[in-house]
Amino acid sequence: MSRPTAGLCDVCVHQKVIRNTRGSSFSLCELSKVDEAFARYPPLPILKCRGFAPRDPEPPGSVA
């Protein structure tokens, strides 16, 4: 079973994926720690967000 897309969060520098012991995963917005306008766990998928900042792409040949 593949996990559903989180929209912009999937490629945002502010996302942290939280996994619990039962195998569920949740998309935490780390901007929520400094700005209460951002939901800690936003309803997904996020299609537009004023706090969106793309992650740097991984350099070619890097091992993830």
Image (cartoon, grey):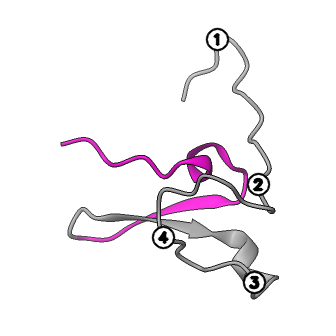
Position above or below: 60 against 43: above
Which residue is denoted by mark 4 in the rendering?
43
Which residue is denoted by mark 2 in the rendering?
52
Name the secondary structure under disc 4: loop
At label 3, the amino acid type is Ala
Q: In the rendering, which numbered label is found on residue 37?
A: 3
Q: Earlier in the sequence, mark 1 or mark 4?
A: 4
Pick the residue in front: 17 or 61.
17
Q: Earlier in the sequence, mark 3 or mark 4?
A: 3
At label 1, the amino acid type is Gly
Q: What residue span does the magenta drawing correspond to?
A: 1-21
Q: Is residue 16 magenta?
A: yes
In which quadrant of the rendered image does the N terminus lie? Answer: top left
Q: Quadrant of residue 22?
A: bottom left
Name the secondary structure under disc 1: loop
Where in the figure is residue 17, as x and y percent of width and height?
Answer: 50, 59
Pick the residue in front: 52 or 61.
52
Q: In the rendering, which numbered label is found on residue 61?
A: 1
Number of the front mark, 1 or 3: 3
